[in-house]
Image (cartoon, rainbow, N blue to C red):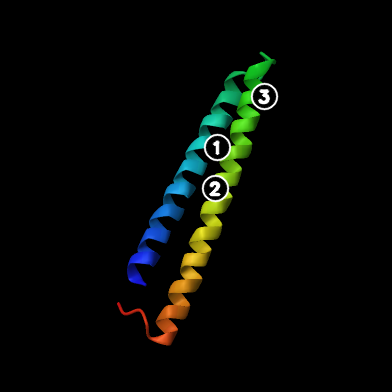
Amino acid sequence: MRAALRSLHVIATVLLAVGFTGLGVAMWSLFLTVDDGGGANIGAGILALFAYAVGGVGLVLLAVTGVVAGVARARGRLTV
């Protein structure tokens, strides 16, 4: 149980970090190409959507990890 929780926590943290990094890159790209128009704005918008989705999945997985750890600790299956 402990190894599964640790791996779920690592995966969720990586997804969250990728989401925030992607969102930062997308916003930087939109800031640089705000007047250019064309494909750069479309690409940055798609990157921002992807980053929001990945970050959201990371947040949900972190919440699930916390709930599972709390339930396992309350049942006595997980020790510190």
Dots 3 and 1: beta carbons under 8 Å?
A: no
Tally of numbered tags: 3
Q: Residue 44's x, y, as percent?
A: 61, 27
Q: Residue furthest left?
A: 80
Quadrant position of residue 34? top right
3D distance between C-alphas at marks 3 and 2: 20 Å
Which is more toward the observer, 43 or 30? Answer: 43
3D distance between C-alphas at marks 2 and 1: 9 Å
Q: Quadrant of the N terminus?
A: bottom left
Q: What amino acid type is highlighted by mark number 3?
A: Ile
**Looking at the image, is mark 3 or mark 1 earlier in the sequence?**
1
Q: Quadrant of the C terminus?
A: bottom left
Which is more toward the observer, 7 or 19? Answer: 7
Residue 42: give its label: 3
Mark nearest the camera among 3 and 1 is 3
Residue hosting label 1: 23
Q: Is residue 13 left or right of residue 47?
A: left
**Looking at the image, is mark 3 or mark 2 earlier in the sequence?**
3
Residue shown at the point (58%, 20%) measured from the top left: 32
Q: Residue 14's x, y, as percent?
A: 42, 48
Which is more toward the observer, 48 or 7? Answer: 7
Residue shown at the point (43%, 79%) measured from the top left: 72
**Looking at the image, is mark 2 or mark 1 earlier in the sequence?**
1
Q: How many C-alpha atoms fall within 10 Å of the one at disc 2: few (<14), some, or many (≥20)?
A: many
Residue hosting label 2: 55
3D distance between C-alphas at marks 3 and 1: 14 Å
